[in-house]
Image: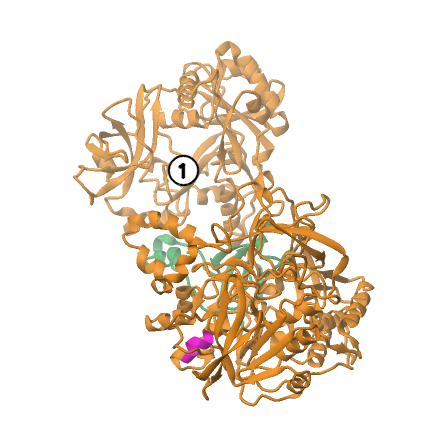
Chain colours: A orange, B green
Amino acid sequence: MSQDYRRDKGGQLNRSKTLRFWYDNKGYEGYQGDTLASALLANGVHLVGRSFKYHRPRGIYSAGSEEPNALVQLESGAHTEPNRRATEVELYEGLSASSQNCWPSVGFDIGAINSKISRLLPAGFYYKTFMWPGALWTTYEKFIRKAAGLGKSPTEIDPDSYDKIHAHCDVLIVGAGPAGLQAALHAGRSGARVMLIDEKPMFGGSLLADSALIDGAPADQWVTKVINELKQMREVTRLTRTTVTGYYDYNFVVANERVNEHLGPNRKAGGPKERLWKIRARQVVLATGAIERPLVFADSDRPGIMLAHALRTYVNHYGVLPGNRIVLITNNDSAYHSALDAHAAGAMVEVIDVRRNPSGSLLDTAREQGIHIHENSTISAVDYRRGKLRGIEVMQLSDDGKAVRGVPSDLRCDLVAVSGGWTPTVHLFSQGKGKLKFLDDEHCYVPGERAVNNKGFEAGSCKATWSLPECLKEGAIAGASAASAAGFESTATEDASGTEESVYGPARALWILPTDHPVGRGPKKHFHELHNDSTVADIALAAREGFVSIEHLKRYTTTGMGTDQGKTSNLNALTVMSEIRDVPIPEVGTTTFRPPFTPLSFGSIVGHDRRELFVQKRKTAIHPWHDRNNAVYEDVGDWKRPYYFPQHGESMHDAVQRECLAARASAGIVDASTLGKIDIQGPDARRLLNMVYTNAWSKLAPGRCRYGLMLNEHGMVFDDGVTTCLAENHFHMTTTTGGAARVMGWLEEWLQTEWPQWQVYCTSVTEQWAVASITGPNAGKLLSTLCDQPLDDESFPFMSMQSFNVAGIPARVFRISFTGDLTFEINVPARYGLALWEALMKAGRQYDICPYGTEAMHILRAEKGFIIVGQDTDGTVTPLDLGMDWIVSKTKGDFLGRRSFTRSDTTRSDRKQLVGLLTEDPSFVLPEGVHVVEKLKDKPPMTMLGHVTSSYMSPNVGRSIAMALLKDGFNRKGSTLEVSLMDGSSHKVTVTDPVFLKSGSE
Amino acid sequence: MLLIECPWCGLRDQTEFHCHGEAHITRPLDPDSLSDEEWGSYVFFRNNPKGLHYERWEHSHGCRRWFNAARDTVTDHVYATYKPGVAKPEIES
């Protein structure tokens, strides 16, 4: 079979370029310029998939992005994409696609049994049936997911590249149909920076399918003329194959350009597959057009039934006549264009008009051409058998249009085209927080008031302007007005005036057409929502069960929740509900339109922001040494910190135990470069420290260090660190690694908003300094081999800082300790960090120096009961809860958080307090986070006293140790409590002081 | 995404900023003289109006300066931005 339904001429195709493609493993041919849908129709293929829920056979329904049915799995392997609309996929050589949601084949699908038992599968069925008992949901889910669904996501990494770009313009125009082209022309002529965007591969919009005349010539000639003029304008950017997917605040617009996507997997290197545009526009002109509205009749979801304008598009733009005997059914005049064009292309055409005594020039022309019009009639049944549409039954409508009468007559046909009028495409306007208004005469929503910051205009059929001359005029005015509003001089001119006009008569407000049994009470189904398989009867059920709010209706029937967002179904659903409730449509309301207008690929959203370009790795100056020495890393914020250094295939446990022992036995060394460091200078520096720390800073002498706790105004600890006085008005503050940015922001907040008159400046110097911290009984001896400085207690006491050369490198050396043993934190300019580390490692060899990571660092501090903010605290812990009242000054006066110590919540007696816990079995390590109770009961509920915050095997203590926050913990010291674990075991623990190791010099 | 005028840098995308809630709350000069209720009100209670809201913003990915903004919480319209210490502008919303 080779393109039997291709017209001999016509269409914007390159007929010299034949393309071979595969659908469900069968080979076909099409032409360059086809979509997958038009090429399939040219080959007589209508049946392309099975529906979401009932597995009903479905065909190609539209010719654009509103397609609810023809979703296909495009390509296979790493290039595969689910749910691609066949109406949007451009044909390329070798294209391969397959139907979705059917097994073993689209023609014979086992899941179609769902259709036979549809009475048992009403709306909300899954919620009602499978949610109880909850424990079995995972069992149900497997079968439901298999039975209902769409395409399959790729399992391999996407091999394509994607791009992102930011752009700014004066006037952004969405839609390049007659109105949009006019707008671009008139805005462009003013010299404004204009962007014109359209989702199709070529500009023209509705004119691509029309047979209208503009300026006395066929419309496509006018389109070419306009494009040529736009090409001459330097400030005009034209984007085809680009969908505006989102319209956000302050005219921020996101658009997805399919750059090389249409070339298929063999697309050449050198360009991205897709590019995401983030555009800020001064003015946005929406010329988004309209989408044809379906009529819903008995079994109107069958393959071979499509929208009337889609028929016209296939005939005129794609050179395909998708049927030989075509029946149109309509409630308005616009479908007659399609009837006339199909007739001119050689089809036998009849029209079923639901109106009584319809008249008008278009109907007169149709009658003159010999097209039979069945007035006041409807389709009461569809004959679809063995994969083909074979005919329909026609019946007369009752006066109110709610019933049929008379006897049905058979009409043979192989294609039915439907038109229920047009729905303006208001998605973007609504996304941009514009208010919609309902036009009673036109039976549709149109843009009303714009959001205050989304300035611009609308033009053409997106505001229910149907006549071509009017659309052209509105476009010109919108373009000129937008340019003027953006500060350019522009006026609308009267070009494109000699335009043919069709005068439409009134439509009949009838969309749900009756059959010979009540809707929803017989074998024939009225599907208003093709994508998610929802029927008119489902809406009635929703109403009966009280889901009358449009937001409830939507979720209950899933109307509009498919990947097409109900572009063809929403208004019919509103109409049905308004009839059931007997209220006007505006009272039923409309749901909020949300981005994206059509689905975006994850690749496009992600762009280049993958792996290291998404989360950047922060590395210290010493990192190359860690890499060379087998470090296993831990992520701390964005930092890569050595977790431990395994030797000779050691386990983590063995490595960490060895590192802890070595650090206390002789000498250990840890890379502490990641600690936050803030340089604070100015006459009011002490005043700042006095306010942000709980202890007193007025008398700290130059060269001396002090540990401090930072509180928020709630009185809760949020950071800690050592701050050193470098000179009278100059301090060096350190923070936790993870809290560095937060603390910097905290200082700035207070200085800028509350104390702007204070003279003090804070500078982040975290990355300026590399820090090697050496600890252990031989740390001093080690350091003395690399400097000329006396390091005895008198010359260089604990909690002090001195500047001198270490290994020839100028250094600030801090004698402070996070291990409880003698420790020197050696700070050098970051570029010397690696040299310092290597010098220390070399000199330390005689002391068996042991590099250790963050896990050993945590154990060493826990042995001494030192806290880690964020692990042993969680934002609900005061210094008093930590047993650290020694650090809270009672005399210095006000500081941040102080007043909160006397709040009723902070003074109550049963607050959680930090204590130590020892297990009965010294070799058993409690899991962190485990809950502690007084006495275990057989089953919950039990009163939880608190939880374990830190827990380790400590080689230096010689047993397991833990810290916990327990209610009234200080008073429980010595008592025995219980914990129960996920594995069912229970354990006894004894409450102790959190200082487990009494030795240690500092 | 909003466009916000930093009083120091000019119009910038919202992604460069952080919002820090209600503005014009002064830290009490003598917290000890406050009742629990007054202190609690300063620490915990904030207005959450529908409509005009004066709030604190930080140009965190720009100049790192703080400023205040008068924003409509319904329409997201920013009426004005102004430096700390400047009196609250009168806005008719």
User: Amino acid under label 1?
Assistant: Val
Placement of A59 over or under A900, stated as above or below: below
Q: Residue furthest right?
A: A232
* Quarter assignment of residue A245: bottom right
Q: In this view, does A135 lie above or below A200?
A: above
Give the secondary structure at mark 1.
Answer: loop
- Which quarter of the rendering shows the C terminus of chain A? top left
Q: Which chain carries label 1?
A: A
Decide which of B60, A448 is in the foreground and name it. A448
Depth order, front residue of A131/A249: A131
Q: Can residue B93 be seen in this view?
A: no
Start-end of magenta stretch: A574-579
Q: Residues within 10 Å of mark 1 (few under 14, many from 20)?
A: some
Q: Position of residue A483 (x, y in %)?
A: 73, 71
Q: How far from the left and from the top, in percent, is residue A788?
A: 57, 15
Give left or right: position of A242 versus A943: right
- Residue at image position (44%, 24%) is A798
Residue pictured at 64% horizontal, 77% vertical: A339
What is the x, y in percent for residue A753? 52, 54
Q: Main secondary structure of the magenta part?
A: helix
**Where residue B41 appears, x then y in whole percent?**
36, 59
**Residue A363 horizontal side relative to residue A615, left or right:** right
- Residue indicated by mark 1: A869
Q: Is residue A542 above or below residue A108?
A: below
Query: Which residue is nearer to you in this view: A861 or A983?
Result: A983
Q: In which quadrant of the rendered image does the N terminus of chain A lie?
A: bottom right
Marks counted in the figure total 1
Q: Can residue A381 be seen in this view?
A: yes
Query: Which residue of the protein is positioned furthest toward the top in this rendering?
Result: A846
Q: Does the magenta stretch include residue A739?
A: no
